[in-house]
Image (cartoon, rainbow, N blue to C red):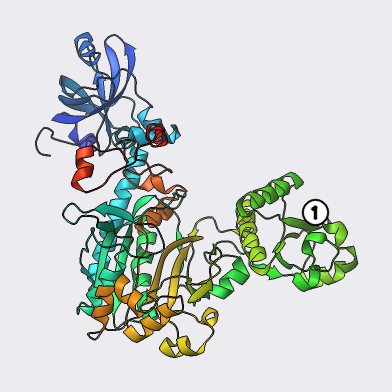
């Protein structure tokens, strides 16, 4: 090693016995046996080494330091009498000749024990993130993230993709979420926006004659946090290919991601390539979602004609969906808890019945089904020990509730869900348009820059809600890793596509002037995708909270509690960017609360 140390705290082994060494690191803990005997643990980025204190004078030196102070220790390596097989440096210990304080921890008590930081309250962890990151278990996730990004970068370069960074300060663009706006000092009343994605820039790069582009792109969206989504900013492996089809994109991703998951993943099995292709419509009908967890072997069946007239009021004139679970051993209490959880998540009730060992229908709504027992058993393919989960409502409500029920049943019944696998699939053939739930108007259902299947001809001839697009999602274990599309590179087709949602040629030219003009100079067909790096690492580590794989995450309210952001700024700063803020009591109280 260089500078102030000869070795790291993970480097010393039996072969180093009798060597004089210099170590630096954090004073993690000390176990005192007597006033002249103790065992100090020194920790650095790489690992831990035991330092043995054998004199009263040296113990007095150590007693001056609080835990988590940084120390320089010079001494001699010797063999440990009691070896620790669980520690890489467990064969040896260091007998110090000199201990020097490098950085003093002035606090007698820590907000939490470093190695137990993951058990602390999240607000406390984020407030003292610099201490939380000292926990080797926490640090390892950030190290893994770095290695994954390096591997992604190397593989993309190997496949002849060129890494190009795109602007952070750009114009506001309708991408489906709220922009973060940045006021301009030199242009009174005008604003930059932080990019929700490099969408337009990467398409313009294709038009500029670049063939294969990628970057590990920062994206900014002012949206609420979820367990699998970080508020504010996130990173994605953004890529685009000229003269490319949907299958070209699939081929590249299927070369890039499986090796990453095989090398760095928590689980041992990764879907073979090519990944399974499932249409959007099939995914909804079979799994009740466009993000199916294929580790679960359960599928949704339509039971509308079978049960809508059974006499059970919630099923009357409704769509009814069934999920059959074979060899179900769930107790009545567990089933009730499961149905309650489905209702909490979907805001819809879930129903059930079972088939007992004698072939009778029991429990739940079984008393309403007696007259149709044989027909139900035959059409649903039931046998003794089967559990049947049921949902109802209009077609889409019944499907989505069944999707929630299916996922929970898979988690509750281990025999129906693979426990150590990454199951990938492509969801394809998304509808180009949909009727908005809130607006009641025709809207783009996925990405407005996508090419409709059939091009301009279908836009002119088909009912909009029947038009499919070359859009696709990559899903792994029920989590959407990325969305992508073959792009609409033809100005005439673009104008027509936007006109169907009420945006004319003038609107398109005003909202996307650079891209629209660029396409008028001979644009190649092109396609791309952008797998989320944060979600990818979360899957690799098996974490359920995305904040565990981000070095400095915001909390669920979009607040950086360590740095105190967002925060108020001085009036002078506001005047420079021509902004006046109306400060109310509510404004100040919100600032204090956060």
Residue at the (29%, 83%) spot, across then down: 243
Q: Camera-side residue: 371 or 588?
A: 588
Work out whether 354 lies above or below 303. above
Residue at the (43%, 75%) spot, across then down: 471
Instruction: Locate residue 522, reporting x and y percent.
Output: 24, 86
Quarter occupied by the C terminus: top left
Instruction: Locate residue 521, reporting x and y percent.
Output: 22, 85
Q: Camera-side residue: 368 or 448?
A: 448
Disc 1 designates what residue? 364
Quarter occupied by the N terminus: top left
Work out whether 393 lies above or below 60. below
Residue at the (58%, 74%) spot, across then down: 282
Instruction: Locate residue 355, reporting x and y percent.
Output: 81, 59
Residue lying farthest right? 371
Q: How many marks?
A: 1
Q: Camera-side residue: 185 or 83?
A: 185
Work out whether 107 lies above or below 364. above
Work out whether 71 lies above or below 279. above
């Amino acid at each position: 090693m260089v500078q102030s140390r000869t070795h790291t705290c993970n480097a010393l082994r039996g072969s180093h016995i009798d060597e004089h060494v210099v170590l630096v690191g954090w004073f993690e803990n000390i176990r005192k046996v007597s006033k002249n005997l103790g065992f100090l643990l020194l920790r650095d980025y790489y690992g831990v080494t035991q330092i043995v204190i054998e004199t009263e004078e040296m113990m007095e030196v150590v007693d001056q330091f609080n835990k988590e102070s940084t120390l320089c220790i010079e001494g001699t390596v010797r063999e440990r009498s009691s070896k620790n097989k669980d520690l890489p440096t467990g064969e040896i210990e260091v007998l110090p000749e000199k201990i020097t304080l490098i950085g003093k921890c002035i606090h007698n008590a820590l907000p939490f024990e470093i190695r137990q930081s993951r058990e602390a309250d999240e607000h406390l962890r984020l407030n003292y993130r610099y201490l939380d990151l000292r926990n080797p278990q926490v640090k390892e996730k950030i190290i893994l993230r770095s290695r994954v990004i390096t591997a992604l970068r190397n593989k993309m370069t190997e496949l002849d993709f060129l890494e190009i960074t795109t602007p952070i300060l750009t114009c506001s663009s309708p991408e489906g979420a709220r922009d973060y706006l940045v006021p301009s000092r030199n242009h009174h009343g005008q604003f930059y926006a932080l990019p929700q994605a490099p969408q337009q820039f990467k398409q313009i790069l294709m038009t500029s004659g670049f063939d294969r582009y990628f970057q590990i792109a920062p994206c900014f969206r002012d949206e609420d946090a979820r367990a699998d989504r970080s508020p504010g900013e996130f990173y994605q492996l953004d890529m685009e290919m000229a003269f490319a089809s949907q299958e070209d994109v699939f081929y590249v991703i299927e070369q890039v991601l499986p090796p990453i998951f095989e090398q760095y993943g928590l689980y041992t099995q990764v879907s073979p390539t090519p990944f399974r292709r499932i249409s959007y419509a099939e995914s909804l009908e079979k799994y009740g979602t466009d993000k199916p967890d294929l580790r679960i072997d359960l599928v949704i069946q339509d039971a509308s004609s079978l049960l809508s007239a059974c006499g059970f009021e919630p099923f009357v004139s409704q769509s009814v969906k069934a999920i059959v679970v074979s060899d179900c051993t769930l107790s009545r209490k567990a089933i009730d808890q499961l149905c309650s959880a489905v209702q909490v998540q979907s805001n819809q009730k879930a129903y059930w019945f079972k088939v007992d060992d004698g072939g009778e229908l029991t429990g739940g709504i079984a008393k309403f089904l007696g007259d149709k027992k044989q027909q139900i058993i035959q059409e649903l393919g039931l046998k003794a020990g089967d559990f049947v989960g049921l949902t109802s409502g209009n077609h889409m409500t019944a499907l989505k509730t069944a999707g929630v029920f299916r996922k929970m049943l898979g988690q509750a019944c281990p025999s129906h869900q693979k426990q150590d696998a990454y199951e990938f699939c492509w969801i394809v053939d998304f509808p180009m348009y949909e009727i908005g739930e809130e607006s009641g108007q025709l809207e783009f259902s996925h990405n407005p820059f996508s090419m409709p299947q059939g091009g301009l001809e279908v836009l002119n001839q088909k009912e909009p809600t029947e038009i499919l697009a070359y859009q696709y999602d990559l899903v792994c274990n029920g989590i959407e890793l990325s969305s992508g599309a073959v792009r609409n590179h033809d100005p005439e087709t673009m104008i027509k596509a936007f006109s169907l949602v009420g945006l004319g040629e003038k609107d398109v030219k005003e909202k996307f002037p650079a891209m629209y003009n660029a396409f008028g100079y001979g644009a190649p067909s092109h396609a791309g995708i952008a797998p989320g790096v944060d979600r990818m690492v979360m899957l690799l580590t098996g974490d359920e909270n995305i904040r565990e794989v981000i070095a400095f995450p915001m909390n669920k309210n979009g607040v950086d509690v360590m740095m105190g952001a967002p925060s108020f700024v001085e009036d002078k700063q506001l005047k420079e960017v021509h902004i006046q803020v109306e400060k109310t009591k509510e404004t100040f109280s919100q600032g204090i609360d956060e």
